[in-house]
Image (cartoon, helix red, strand yellow):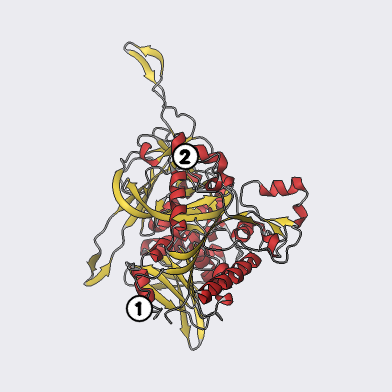
Amino acid sequence: MADMRRYLVGCEMSGIVRDALAEADPDAEVWSCDVLPTERPARCVIRPVSGRWEVTERLGCTPLGNTFHYQGDVRDLFDPEHPANQARFADLQCNYIAPEEDLWTLGVMHPPCFTAGTPVITARGVLPIEQVGIGDQVLTHKGRWRIVTGRMSREARVITDGQVTATPDHPFWVRRKLPAMYGPSRAKGGGRQLPFGLALADWVPASETAGSYLGIPAKAAPLAVPPLAGIVKTTAFWYMVGRWLGDGWTRIEDTSGHNHFDTIICCARGESGDLAAWLAETGLKWRRSEERTVTRFTLSDTHLCRWLEECFGRYAHGKTLPGWIFGAPEGVRQSLLNGYLDADGSRQATASPSLISNVPTVSRGLAVGIRVLATTLGYTTTLTRNRRAGQSVIEGRTVTQRDSWTVVIRKDDGRFTRFDGTHRWVKQRRSWQDAGVQVVYDIIVDEDHSFTAHGFAVHNCDHLSQAGAVWWKHKDATRGGDGRMQQGAAFFMEMVKAPARYVAVENPVGVMGLVRTQPHVAYREPDQIVEPWMFGDPLAKQTCWWLKGLPLLVPVNPVKPTGRVATGGGSWRTDQRSGRGANNGHEDSEGRKNRKIVRSRTSAAMARAMASQWTAFIKAQEAAA
């Protein structure tokens, strides 16, 4: 099939546009691409795993056999020699593309910084930044939970202090140290130096934070705790959860066709009496067994086992803390932390009296979560990374080792940190070093435009949208900003120049079309601005299209808009003032907390119009050639 049409939908997690194209042109090969898994099933998925490209067959999961998804950077699919494309040609037996051909027939692009693995505090846990998706709630520098409205990834030069790796210009929430001040003299020789003070907080590029004080959120708004059937969450229960986090696991076994759900907690024999007393207070049923080196407690409760995995993760390297724990009552937070420290913490006899515990873990997300949890309880913390060799021999067995992280928790004595009621300010003592070019990730957050990465409050990206206009001066290099606007524009232009015969690039109203007011960044005025109500969805949301070789979209079954799909902060208040507050059934169809998930999806009616009109045009052009 030398004439097979190949369609690529870039930066789309939902799969709505991809599936519309597949339905309109069943003979075409249709791809979606995003750094996260697709919401809708595809015939096959290609994703990078440990330096290679894994192809996952999902035949039978979808009625559309010509749909595919690449979980990675869309620009990978611009290069015919990239391993992702080679896997596409070889493993999927997709039609090979000769060098003189266009790599793609049609490219529909939706353009979107920390390196992969950077832990971000979200409502569903402390997650690697590449796993944070549109609709997730993240903890902002104001201690509030706000929804992610966009994401991006790209290659960029980065710096590292040995723990955090970020682009040099990524802003951190920082307070500078004020000049030393001295009190009145009490003895010959001069006055006594007063405790140091800090300037007002401001956003400072990572490369300029050395010697300054970074903000760790010390407060979080409360979130609902997932229900747990049949169990009363007492102080003893939360202590038990902390013990499980430190030295426990879950086990699901299939015996004679029946699943057994076990929650297992281990401890040293000398601690078994205390742990047994705590477990007895929970009211749960458990059994005890003596192993070769430890005492094991097993709780056989299906609901508990599932609840722990859903909220706190699985396996030692996959454990985390859910977002709701940071805003839970103080007694809950303290009980859980006490259990965790009793399970995994240690303290040397010669240690400083202010030291509470040293806690190691192989889970970076859990380490960051414990640090922030301790900060909310008034403690001072430090976090260090312990690099290990890839393999080791333990009792004659060769085992694979992971790097570990150690959280040091101390009582605050006011000498080295500052607390202002909302943040614990800790000094950036490590120097930043160049770390070469890596793939970096960033997100856009509603209203507060910030999130918590590696435990620190940092700014988000919102470089091109009108919703982030208030921040443009901080991102525009020509106005003394950090240059993120120019970086976003460069990414946009890469989408415009995608190796496709026909290209459509979508973006909200913003700088890329403001030729008169932002000529140093803007591309050109959009070819067309459309809204969902023009195609039968009774919603208002302006979407700009820049087209190459394609005709303008023709409205189909236009209706009167009765609601809006907004993308900027304050849209709820705007709706109320404009009298449209009663017409947000679409936005709130999945609950208020999921409004931004609904808003971010492409209108299904608009997607069908795009697919039917543009595929018909492409077929007509081919027939006339």
Q: What element carries label 2?
A: loop
Q: What element carries label 1?
A: helix
Provide residue 42's location: percent of width, then percent of height.
Answer: 50, 75
CA distance separating discs 1 and 2:
44 Å
Amino acid type, callout 1: Ala
Q: Which residue lies furthest to the bottom in this view?
A: 256
Choose between 254 and 511: the one closer to the eye: 511
User: In the figure, is residue 430 to the left or right of 329?
Assistant: left
Provide residue 581's location: percent of width, then percent of height.
Answer: 75, 52
Provide residue 149's location: percent of width, then percent of height.
Answer: 56, 54
Q: Residue at x 24, y 68 (%)?
A: 394
Question: In the rendered view, would you say 186 is above or below 564?
Answer: above
Q: Which residue is drawn at 44% across and 34% down?
A: 480
Sort mark 2 into few (<14), some (14-19) or many (20+) by Cα contacts within 10 Å: some
Provide residue 566's location: percent of width, then percent of height.
Answer: 65, 52
Amino acid type, callout 2: Asp
Choose between 525 and 180: the one closer to the eye: 525
Q: Earlier in the sequence, mark 1 or mark 2?
A: 1
Residue 448 in view = no
Q: Do the residues labelled 1 and 2 touch (CB within 8 Å)?
A: no
Residue 217 image label = none
Screen quadrant of the N terminus: bottom left
Residue 29 in view = yes
Sort mark 1 into few (<14), some (14-19) or many (20+) by Cα contacts within 10 Å: few
Choose between 6 and 245: the one closer to the eye: 6
Looking at the rendering, which quadrant does residue 484 occupy? Answer: top left
Choose between 597 and 378: the one closer to the eye: 597
Which residue is the site of mark 1? 90
Which residue is the site of mark 2? 476
Q: Residue furthest top?
A: 188
User: In the figure, is residue 153 to the left or right of 134?
Assistant: left
Question: In the rendered view, would you say 277 is above or below 411?
Answer: below
